[in-house]
Image (spheres, grey):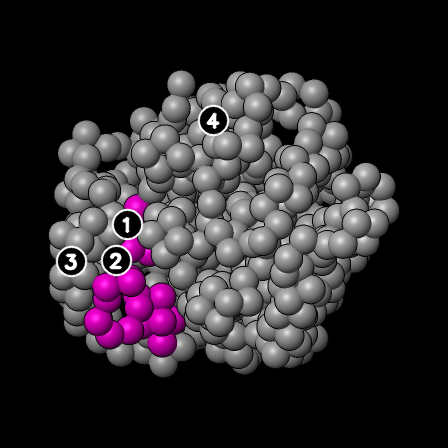
Amino acid sequence: MLKQWGYTALGATLVVGLAACSSSNNDGAASSASNSGTASASASGQAASGTKTKISYWTPDRHDAVFMKAKIDEFNKTNTDNIEVEMTVMADNYADAVDIAFASKQAPDVLQVNNLETYVKKGYITPLNAYMDDATKARFDSILIENKNMIDGQIYSFPNIGQTWRLIYNKDLFAKAGIAEAPKTLAELVEDAKKITAAGKADGAYGFASNFKSSSGFWRPSITVSTASGSTGAEGYNFQTGQFDFNSVKDIAVALRQMKEDGSMMPGVESLDMDPLRAQFAQGKIGMYINHSGEPGVYKDQFPTTVNWAAALPPTADGTIHGAVNVVGGSYIGISNDSPNKEKAWKFLQYVYSLDLQKEYYESGYGVSLIPDVIQAAATPSLPGIEGFLPTKYDALYPATPLSATEADLEGTKYGDVLTKYVIVGGDLDKMIADLNTRYNAALAKARADGTTKIEADPSFDASKLQGTLAK
């Protein structure tokens, strides 16, 4: 049975790269591009008998970089097909880097699928149907997601994990500020950030932060809070009307702006990237931020910390979860259409999706598995902090939105950049939202007219009905 679920895509702006196989932030975007180009060039053509065929693999995931590097090293040493995989870990420039790589004929052999509709339309990835045996088809059949794993019967990527999203907070700073529990409302979020800053500013601690160096600094809290607060959409798209209405993220934009005006945000958030934010949190300098279930792995491997921290369901406009907290997940990696080594790339995919690797990945706390045989075989993750990220009745996979297809036809600045600027410097928010609605709905009409997206209105959609679909 094929499920009609999808996920919403993260629109990122070009920032910095991360050196291949590294788990620390790096300001050298050129270094990543250079590494990937070298890998692609070395992978051109079939390797001579007895020599290694190099497969380049690109991912934007940094939270699991230590784990995946170890597993890829193991694969390189033990596989009997003369395959050597080189992993490049990108930063928030992933979407742009992929476009540039394909345009310059330097695309990786294997890459994480950022948005299925876009990647298929651009011809970036190849269908996997021809490589799949009956066992593989049976393993994934019940969890394939339309517009996320497959389009018109062609399967491009299998599910692996879902990211549950939470408010992450420093319990020590909460206690110091006299706060007993995580905020339930946006008003409490703003007030708690002010209290934490007042209590901790002398020691360099502030109430809240987000990675506003890119638009994902707004996207992360907005996608989490808006889907919990409302019941009609995600990423500014209203499933019921089939139109964009960014009033759905207005409340969180106002709250973020208020914390900036109050001085409750860490100074310099406008140039803060995700890994430096994590490093500051690990040092006890940030009271709260919003991110996903990869964080326990981060604070185990990447930025080990002694901070007493926890994760809670996000605050909402009125303290009630009316919809469901969006779980980002569904697809994972696919094979480049440009790869000259598709058969060997498939061998690597089989390894990554194997029961043993996926079971260890889940048990280590790097993500919540969506694969039935993994869930059945795996023990409950024991990684410190993961308990706050395990799915609840309020977590759910949402239908796919047409955001990526719309932004491909959009005239003017994207919503994430517009609203990030509002958070940092202020302005007339109502006017900004009205302009965004006009431009996005015009672009959506074009995308539908030219067939870039087939997603239409669903008047029966109600996110509250998604509650309980992942956990009771």
Residue 253: image location, x then y, percent: 34, 64
Check disc 2 and report its element: helix, strand or loop.
Answer: helix
- The residue at which mark 1 appears reads as 402
Check disc 1 and report its element: helix, strand or loop.
Answer: loop
CA gap between label 3 and label 1 equals 12 Å
- The residue at which mark 2 appears reads as 406
Q: Is residue 137 left or right of residue 80?
A: left
Image point (19%, 41%), residue name: 456
Inspect the image, locate mark 4, and give the three-letter code of the amino acid beneath it: Ile
Check disc 4 and report its element: helix, strand or loop.
Answer: helix
Image point (24%, 74%), residue name: 412
Q: Is residue 45 left or right of residue 468?
A: right
Do tag 1 and tag 2 residues touch (Cβ < 8 Å)?
Answer: yes
Q: Quadrant of residue 375?
A: top right
Which of 275 and 119 lies nearest the eye of the viewer? 119
Inspect the image, locate mark 3, and give the three-letter code of the amino acid beneath it: Lys
Which is nearer the N-term, disc 2 or disc 4?
4
Check disc 3 and report its element: helix, strand or loop.
Answer: helix
- The residue at which mark 4 appears reads as 143
Residue 283: image location, x then y, percent: 73, 66
Which is nearer the N-term, disc 1 or disc 4?
4
CA gap between label 2 and label 4 equals 26 Å
Q: Residues within 10 Å of mark 2 (few under 14, many from 20)?
A: many
Magenta residues, start to end: 401-421
Residue 446 has which mark?
Answer: 3
- In the rendered structure, does residue 408 fall within the stretch colored magenta? yes
